[in-house]
Image (cartoon, rainbow, N blue to C red):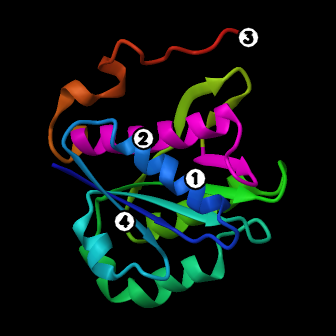
Amino acid sequence: MNKILVLFDSATGHTAAMAALVAEGARRIADTDVRLRTVDEAKAADVLWCDGLAVGSPTNMGLLSWKMKRFWDVEMMEHWAEIDGKIACAFSSAARWGGGMEIACQSMLTVLMNFGFLVFGVTDFVSKRLTLHYGAAAALAPREDDAQAACRLLGQRLAEWCAVFIHGRMAEHPGNKASARNLPQA
């Protein structure tokens, strides 16, 4: 059974909306249990429980939120060596496009790499102009179809990689699926 944690901070509800879509995407993969937790309610036990982690934060001056950073500095620091080898990805929202969402995702991925997580980006396009190399990004709430699709794809890919690399379910490998690499035409 895949165990996926979607951990997020959300000041306005925009990142929370993204988190719900990431969780929805993870649930597309059979035998996947998903926990959705705010950074305020999450405990170290949630991170220790999961195989895969999707971390979301509002973009704060191009970086992750102070609450998310505090969670890793305070709640998780004593568990630093216990979570090595789990799989993770990131997502972020900002007030406008160009607000630094990809940089915020990179800042979260850097924190996760320091804890030993294996992190990934997604090369698949969800629309003619949108892919999620560093994670899913949205300006404000994910209202557009492509922003919603990006969030769902991120969660789905996390569950696929956990199924493959944690549980040995090679049939879930994205490259083995008929829909894999179905890129939109330019």
Q: Which residues are magenta?
A: 134-163
- Amino acid bearing label 4: Gly
Instruction: Identify the residue at horizontal 38%, vertical 83% (top origin).
Output: 76
Q: Are marks 2 and 3 in contact (CB under 8 Å)?
A: no
Q: Position of residue 130 (x, y in %)?
A: 69, 31
SS at badge 3: loop
Q: Label 1 belongs to which residue?
A: 18
Q: Which mark is residue 25?
A: 2
Estimate the spatial distance between the alpha carbons at disc 2 and disc 3, rounded to whole Å: 25 Å
Q: Earlier in the sequence, mark 2 or mark 3?
A: 2
Mark 2 surroundings: few (<14), some (14-19) or many (≥20) residues within 10 A = many
Instruction: Identify the residue at horizontal 49%, vertical 39% (top origin).
Output: 152
Instruction: Identify the residue at horizontal 55%, vertical 62% (top origin).
Output: 56
SS at badge 2: helix
Q: Which mark is residue 116?
A: 4
Q: Nearer the viewer, residue 80 or 74?
A: 74
Q: Earlier in the sequence, mark 3 or mark 4?
A: 4
Q: Are marks 1 and 3 in contact (CB under 8 Å)?
A: no
Foreground: disc 4 or disc 1: 1
Foreground: disc 2 or disc 4: 2
What secondary structure predominates along the stretch shown in magenta? Answer: helix
Vertical relation: 38 (above or below) 56: below
- Amino acid bearing label 1: Met
Indicate the quadrant where residue 87 lies.
bottom left
Vertical relation: 18 (above or below) 84: above
Q: Earlier in the sequence, mark 2 or mark 4?
A: 2
97 left or right of 72 in image? right
Estimate the spatial distance between the alpha carbons at disc 4 and disc 1, rounded to whole Å: 25 Å
Estimate the spatial distance between the alpha carbons at disc 3 and disc 4, rounded to whole Å: 37 Å
Estimate the spatial distance between the alpha carbons at disc 2 and disc 4, rounded to whole Å: 24 Å
Q: Which mark is residue 186?
A: 3
- Amino acid bearing label 2: Gly
